[in-house]
Image (spheres, rainbow, N blue to C red):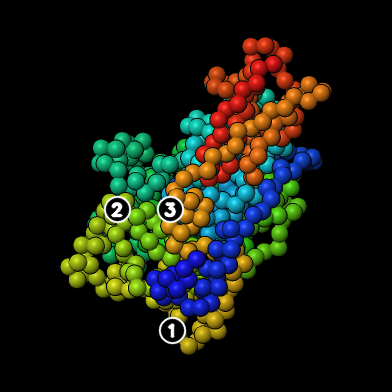
């Protein structure tokens, strides 16, 4: 550790060096791997996730009169709509890292955008627990976990993966379908591609830029209005795909025994939303339909976060929730008491560094800028491709920004920000220096600092130092090869010396499309009787290179 150097670089107070030292200790700690628990659920519902990229709750069912989203709105009318659901990050990779593990990325070292983290040994993709309990798990098709998706996480992980491909139609499934047509890149797609998309919408479904109601922090120009309209067009286009997925479920006779989750991975894909910890970047739609268990058309004002998805799904499937998961169960008989706060973080975004933390209760949002000397509007090459961002920069360079749109182009950020999200939902009036809110500021600051300590936040450790600790000299660790031992009873027992590793194996089983089906190893297995069908095994540890494939012929 070099705390003096870090202190000079970040200008933080001594209390934050305590956080840093605590986090450094966490990195070097050794924790025993968590065993996959057995499960005997009383009933095993199917579970379907439909995820959209880069959308805020800009839907008709959330009160957006500009939106055209009939299929999603109908899903909300049939289930439960969470009004205060949040991601723990404003961008996809840290978000999805937390979703698949149930852990804060800032705790497990996957908090920088598109890093290649090495989580602690006890961290696993939660789908392994589902597979161990007998679920068929599919993902179509985005992972983006800030570590490679291991073969042990999914029965089928590719474009086109589907519950219909499971070998046994009676096997319960957990299926994820990620829809990418709302991604920020689709807002700025070529005119030719946009017209192809718009051509599949009805005339009344295409959004008129003149009727857009822009947030007050944006400059009101035709360029910005067009981006806003096209963002909504992308949602309407994707809503049709959501309708088709739900129709497939009904056609297969599975709608009544399938819990459907609908969510967006973080806020809308526009500047000062995506990548940021304002509500525009972290507040998301979350809808759950569970026939016979959730009253249709209900809403919840409880604070929920994406870390809750993993433990909730495990609980609903009757699978024990690992103690180290940092989310909580938000549905079903094991539902946890409502929480008081949710938390979010921003760290490196692509090539650009910043360190921002946020804590929110039902009313107030506290933001701590650990690099206040940096401006909000740093250059990020990918973000700068958006016409809205280009227009905003042009107006700033020409000195034409005033009022709320000018805040984003200040030369520095305040150390602290405090917003009353009920009175100021767009978070443009910073109350941190208002004496009337001094006690609120003090409370939220203390909650934020305690959270950093409790979760071992790694954000104040320079990224190079983190990677040197987990990957010395830039050299990747390699998972040990699995060892196959044939027991006296003829069953094969497979082990791996790498702490925290999981093992996949195959004995010739095929997917519906003819590809090899790799199973999760949980207990000794019967060897194939066919001399031409070998047993193959491979080991995986998150953040390590995969082992070689070991083959044993009968």
Q: In this view, does 361 lie above or below 35?
A: below
- Residue 274, percent from left and from top: 41, 56
Query: Observer-nearest residue: 543 or 214?
Result: 543
Instruction: Sort mark 2 into few (<14), some (14-19) or many (20+) by Cα contacts within 10 Å.
Output: few
Q: Quadrant of the C terminus?
A: top right
Looking at the picture, tell me which residue is in the foreground, 346 or 491: 491
Which residue is under mark 3? 113
Q: In this view, does 59 lie above or below 221?
A: above
The vertical placement of 288 against 197, above or below, is below
Q: Name the residue under label 2.
A: 381
Q: Which of marks 1 and 2 is nearer the N terminus?
A: 2
The reply to whether residue 288 is in sight is: no
Name the residue beneath numbered marker 1: 433
Check the image and name the residue furthest to the front: 473
Q: What element carries label 3?
A: loop
Disc 3 or disc 1, which is closer to the eye?
Answer: 3
The Cα atoms of the two marked residues, 3 and 1, are separated by 32 Å
């Amino acid at each position: 550790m070099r705390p003096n150097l870090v202190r000079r670089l970040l200008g933080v107070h001594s209390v934050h060096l305590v956080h840093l030292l605590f986090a450094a200790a966490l990195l070097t700690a050794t924790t025993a791997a968590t065993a996959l628990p057995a499960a005997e659920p009383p009933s095993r519902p199917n579970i379907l996730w439909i995820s959209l990229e880069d959308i805020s709750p800009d839907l008709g069912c959330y009160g957006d009169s500009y939106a055209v989203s009939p299929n999603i709105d109908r899903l909300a009318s049939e289930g439960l709509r969470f009004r205060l659901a949040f991601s723990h990050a404003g961008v996809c990779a840290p978000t999805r890292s937390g979703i698949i593990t149930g852990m804060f990325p800032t705790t497990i070292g996957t908090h920088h955008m598109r890093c290649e983290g090495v989580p602690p040994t006890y961290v696993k993709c939660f789908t392994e627990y589902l597979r161990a309990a007998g679920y068929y798990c599919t993902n179509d098709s985005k992972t983006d976990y800030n570590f490679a998706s291991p073969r042990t996480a999914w029965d089928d992980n590719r474009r086109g993966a589907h519950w219909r491909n499971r070998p046994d139609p009676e096997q319960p499934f957990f299926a994820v379908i990620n829809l990418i047509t709302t991604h920020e890149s689709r807002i700025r797609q070529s005119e030719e591609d946009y017209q192809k998309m718009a051509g599949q919408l009805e005339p009344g479904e295409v959004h008129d830029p003149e009727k857009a109601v822009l947030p007050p922090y944006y400059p009101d120009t035709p360029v910005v209005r067009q981006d806003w309209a096209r963002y909504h067009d992308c949602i309407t286009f994707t809503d049709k795909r959501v309708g088709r997925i739900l129709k497939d479920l009904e056609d297969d006779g599975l709608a009544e025994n399938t819990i459907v989750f609908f969510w967006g991975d973080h806020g809308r894909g526009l500047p000062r939303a995506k990548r940021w910890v304002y509500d525009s970047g972290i507040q998301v739609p979350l809808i759950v339909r569970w026939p016979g268990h959730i009253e249709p058309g209900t809403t919840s004002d409880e604070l929920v976060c994406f870390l809750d998805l993993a433990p909730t799904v495990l609980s609903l499937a009757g699978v024990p929730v690992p103690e180290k998961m940092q989310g909580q169960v938000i549905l079903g008989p094991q539902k946890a008491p409502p929480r008081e706060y949710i938390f979010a973080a921003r760290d490196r975004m692509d090539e650009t560094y910043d360190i921002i933390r946020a804590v929110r209760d039902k009313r107030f949002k506290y933001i701590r800028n650990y690099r206040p000397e940096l401006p909000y509007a740093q250059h990020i090459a990918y973000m700068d491709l958006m016409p809205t961002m280009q227009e905003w920069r042009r107006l700033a360079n020409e000195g034409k920004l005033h009022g709320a749109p000018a805040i984003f182009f200040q030369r520095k950020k305040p150390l602290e920000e405090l917003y009353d999200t009920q009175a100021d939902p767009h978070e443009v009036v910073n109350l941190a220096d208002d004496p009337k809110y001094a006690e609120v500021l003090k409370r939220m600051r203390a909650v934020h600092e305690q959270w950093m300590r409790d979760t071992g936040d790694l954000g104040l450790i320079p990224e190079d130092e983190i990677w040197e600790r987990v990957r010395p000299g830039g050299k990747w660790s390699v998972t040990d090869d699995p060892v196959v031992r044939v027991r006296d009873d003829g069953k094969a027992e497979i082990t791996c010396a790498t702490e925290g590793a999981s093992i996949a194996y195959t004995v010739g089983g095929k997917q519906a499309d003819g590809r090899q089906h790799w199973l999760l190893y949980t207990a000794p297995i019967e060897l194939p009787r066919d001399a031409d069908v070998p047993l193959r095994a491979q080991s995986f540890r998150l953040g390590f290179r995969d082992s070689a494939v070991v083959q044993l012929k009968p």
